[in-house]
Amino acid sequence: MTKESNMAILPLVIAPDERLNTPSEPVKVVDDSIRKLLDDMLDTMYANDGIGLAAVQVGVHKRCIVVDLAVRDGGRDPIKFINPEIIRKSDETHVFQEGCLSFPDQYSDVIRPSSVTVRYLNERGEQKEIEASELLATCLQHEMDHLDGLLFVDRLSRLKRDMLLRKLAKQRRDAV
Ligand code: ZN
């Protein structure tokens, strides 16, 4: 079997969509179906030029996320997270301009803790911890918010959020 025949690019859930506001369930058993889901999520993320993706964004309410910051430099260095949780976060905060594959072409500055420690299971079901700072810290927090049904626009002021949602609605109307 070639690599290509295994690839599955899944349709993205685009906001506004109830599914994006629904919390995801913990994974009970890390099996082949979860590993396949994570691989499909990566294929979908790469195909859409993303650096992070949560399962809910392909319509699956399981606590799985994938992240790959290396794609920005043309490389590949994916990390797969199952049941991730933040066990430490800094008081210090930072600001990054965030985007989201569920909000095409919408970007906004978001303030978040500048470093976090995340505990998770890898695809073999082993417990791992990662200390993240800079963009990785923001990316992980953004994706983990998805698992709780939270979107980056929920972290904005009401004014900024309304502006962004109006732009998105207009974009959708124009696309029809
Ligand atoms: Zn997102």
Image (cartoon, helix red, strand yellow):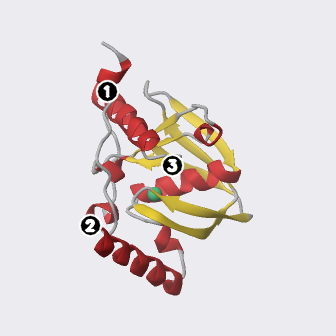
Closest to the observer: 176 or 15?
A: 176
| Residue marked by disc 2 | 18
Horizontal side of residue 45 vs 155, given as left or right: left
Residue 139 in the image: state x and y as whole percent. Answer: 57, 52
Residue 24 in the image: state x and y as whole percent. Answer: 33, 53
Residue plotted at (62% across, 64% down)? 97
Relative to 148, is 85 above or below?
above
Contact flag, marks 1 and 3 (Cβ < 8 Å):
no
Which quarter of the figure has residue 165?
bottom left
Circle 2: residue type = Glu
Relative to 3, is 163 above or below?
below
Which circle's residue, 1 or 3, is located before the other in the chain? 1
Quadrant of the snapshot with the C terminus:
bottom left
Circle 3: residue type = Glu
The crowding category of the residue bearing disc 1, from other C-alpha atoms within 10 Å (few below 14, some 14 to 19, many at least 20), is few
Do we see residue 1 in this rendering? yes
Circle 1: residue type = Asp
Closest to the observer: 91 or 16?
A: 16
Mark drawn on residue 31: 1
Depth check, mark 2 against mark 1: the one in front is: 2
Which circle's residue, 2 or 1, is located before the other in the chain? 2
